[in-house]
Image (spheres, rainbow, N blue to C red):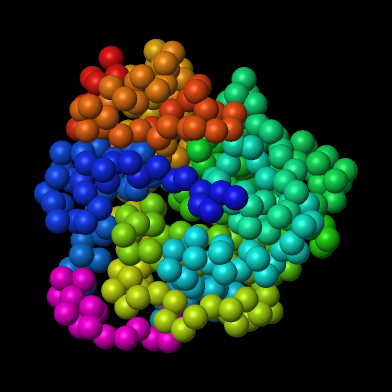
Amino acid sequence: MKVQAYHGGASFEAIGVDLTHLERAGEVITADVLDAWFDPAPEVLETLKEHLAFLLKSSPPSHAEGFVEEVARWRGVPPASVLPGAGSSSLLFACLPRMLEAGRPVAVLDPMYSEYEHIAGTLLGCPLLRAGLRGEDGFAVRTETLIDLVRRERPQAVLLVNPNNPTGRCWPRDEALEFVNAAGTGTLVVVDETYLEFAGEGLSLEPEAAQRRNLVVVKSMSKVYALSGARVGYMVLHPETAGEMSKWLPPWPVGLLSQAAAMEALRHPEYYRQRYQETRQLREEFRQALAGLNPLPSCTNYFLIQPPQPAELAERLRARNIYVREFFSGILAGKYLRVTVRSREENLRMIKAMG
């Protein structure tokens, strides 16, 4: 049995997992993971710097009440619908086994973030109904195909990532809502919106998730707020479901330093709005420069390329301390690489190395 999903991160081979040589980080381009190229808002860094000793030595509020209130205020949802966690993955491992019935079918996109397949398929033994996305369509999500699958197969749940990882394709909000409505009360729809802010504003289903029993929205603050190292995320779901799931979460679900960073980040939306716009510009410049490698369309901070020899290119880049995401199984294996948008200087370095 496969005990873990693969998430890349080979760049830490160069930096060192013991963290005793963090000065090497500036020499390595970590385009194999999807971390932000920009820093957290200056106010976040100032808060951590000013109160670092207290934040490190003090126990946090037992249920992250302040963080929950801040999320609710900025997202326009009731606090009772927000479930906090040490990154979205911790919430997935805690909640999905209690939302899903072991052995009953679950639908997933293919390709898609592998953790959902790991939890539902490997750990819970749920048969996976794969909604295959086609490379010739740029891996676009076809709403009518998903609706047909749900009506035909009646899965207990549909697990989705929007924008999809690793393809970078975005599902329009109106189509996502159309699908949720078509799924009906008998099918749970879980939508992971980890990268959605890169795609634009007003796209989230969080307000609907707070009102509907068949919809759960998963949010990570890692990528869009440049807080991957802080491990902080949340779910938005119907208040009664949130109350039931909260029974299975430990006290102190988010560290105090992480809570402080996340709350301060939420208070400075304009800073991040500008970074998202810059990311979109950097992405298109990067894609145009890599036109010879057949870059696929994307709405977020990463995209797929199709080099003639993906493994050879990845190895050549590693020799220059540039790490991109390889695929070793599934329909992307041996055909595609995933590249993360970095700073303009780092992107230029990657462009030169790929030439």
- Direction from residue 354 to residue 221 in the image, left or right: right
- Direction from residue 242 to residue 345 in the image, left or right: left
Q: Looking at the picture, does residue 131 appear above or below residue 80?
A: above
Q: Position of residue 103 (x, y in %)?
A: 77, 57
**Residue at 14% over, 56% down:** 20
Q: Position of residue 23 (x, y in %)?
A: 11, 49
Q: Position of residue 263 (x, y in %)?
A: 36, 71
Examine the rendering and report whether any part of residue 308 can be seen. Answer: yes
Q: Looking at the picture, does residue 135 appear above or below residue 65?
A: above
Could you say which quadrant of the image residue 124 lies in? Answer: bottom right
Q: Residue furthest right?
A: 152
Could you say which quadrant of the image residue 282 lies in? Answer: top left
**Residue at 31% over, 59% down:** 229
Please name whichever residue, 288 or 134, is drawn nearer the observer in this view of the structure. Answer: 134
- Direction from residue 53 to residue 334 in the image, left or right: right
Q: Looking at the picture, does residue 226 appear above or below residue 321?
A: below
Which quarter of the figure is the C terminus placed in?
A: top left
**Residue at 64% over, 37% down:** 110
Q: Is residue 154 magenta?
A: no
* Span of residues in magenta: 48-64
